[in-house]
Image (tube, grey):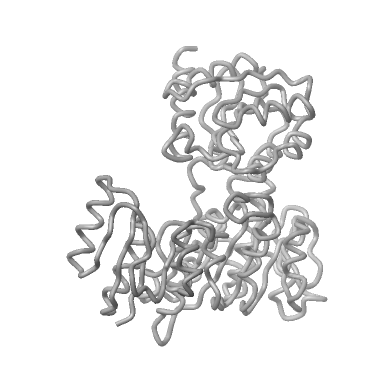
Amino acid sequence: MSLTCVAGLGVSGTAVARALAGRGERVVVVESGGGERQLAAAAELSGRGVEVRLGPLSLPEGTTRLVTTGWAPHHPLIAAALSAGVEVIGEVELAWRLRPAEPAPWLALTGTNGKTTAVRMLTAMLTAAGHKAAAVGNVGVPVVEAVREPYDVLAVELSSFQLHWSATLAPHAAAVLNVAPDHLDWHGSMDAYAAAKGRVFERAGTVIYNADDPECARLAGPYPGAVGFTLRVPRPGQVGLVEDLLVDRAFVGDPVEAAEELATLADVRPLAPHNVANALAAAALARAFGVPAEAVRQGLRDFTPDPHRLAHVARVAEVDYVDDSKATNPHAAAAALASYPSIVWVAGGQLKGADVADLVSQAAPRLRGAVLLGADRARIAEALARHAPNVPVVDIEGQDTGVMDRVVTEASRLASPGDTVLLAPAGASLDMFPGYPARGEAFARAVRALAAGT
């Protein structure tokens, strides 16, 4: 019997092991961790006949296929499998192969930023149109589980890691929201990262791209009939904005002569340029699946924004405090910074190899101050000194849980009435917090404590 090795006991790895064991396949899961969560997952899988090996990682003898849940190609286990001629695929690729005879179509979406927001907007539009739909993939629900359920359509959020290990996906429609430097430590170069994003287009029935993003336009270039979305007035074959209206000139009977109103800017929450782009991308994917305009509008109205995405925490002494902790890379932080005219910026964390010079240069006119924390704060401080030398900067040392209290206190001292204190870190959070939600919650608690003391 062939042997599949599953790398990792996370949510996706455990789901893969369950799915394969349910098909009667021989599965070995390898996991370096041995904590309480891993032990519980191992016990559950062993009851299903899955062997779990905790401790030092090695490729089980006789492995014919390795399923990874986002591990990089240079990881020693992955490299060993590749050098041994073992097929390496990801959870998403496996899910595609395990689809039933009459599978639900996939509407796939990727991008550096905005993926989760856009895929959840899309799911709301599909639901408003009467379809049984689910948001799956990088959004949290493993695709390998979802493909076994009786959905009409799946809204699939895909990361660059998942796409790197996917070779045969053929979604009904696919969109790329934006492409900016991120995860360069994983991919090795910007070219490799962009190429991974572009894989979503290779077999897609309809290609949808951000016409305002040169890298997205380049990736869509080889595909005739690709549909662009834009914050400008749309040309034939695009969706875009006409004054305060979201308008379709792609999925209409005569794109040259006709246009259809999909929604208004008032239907988009939170209202910020990058979120309007998310709404347009979701609308284009929905329209590619035949969703009527009224369901696009209703879906946007039904959509509840994610926590830690431009979330208004409080107004204290005529200063607004906004949590965008999910801005874990410079591109996301740039979108947040572009949403407010006068900002005290709270930034820092793990930059993952990304450069912040362009971010700081573009944001400089809006900055009234900056408070920096986290592992790579010195790199942001250097960019501020070079591109925004007149902006006052406060550097907060330490990794303790009280750091965010000091951050908010210092930010309040820098802020004047009418300013926005914006947590848009431009970096990952794992140097100080369990994840970006914990970072945002710490910021919100500190703001509430500030408000209580005023």
Residue placed most toward the observer, 66 or 256: 66
For the residue pair 228 and 110, the one nearer the viewer reads as 110
Q: Nearer the viewer, residue 34 or 168?
A: 34
Q: Quadrant of the N terminus?
A: bottom left
Q: Residue furthest left?
A: 47
Say which quarter of the image contains residue 212.
bottom right
- Number of numbered discs overlaid on the protein picture: 0
Q: Residue at x 69, y 75 (%)?
A: 251
Quarter of the rendering containing residue 217: bottom right
Q: How far from the left and from the top, in percent, is residue 23?
A: 29, 79
Residue 20 position within the rendered picture, expressed as x and y whole percent measured from the top left = 32, 74
What residue is shown at x 51% (from left), y 40% (from top)? 308
Q: Position of residue 137 (x, y in %)?
A: 46, 63
* Residue 167 sits above or below residue 341 on the image: below
Q: Nearer the viewer, residue 53 or 377?
A: 53
Q: Quadrant of residue 44?
A: bottom left
In the rendered image, residue 133, in percent from the top left (x then y), is placed at: 44, 69
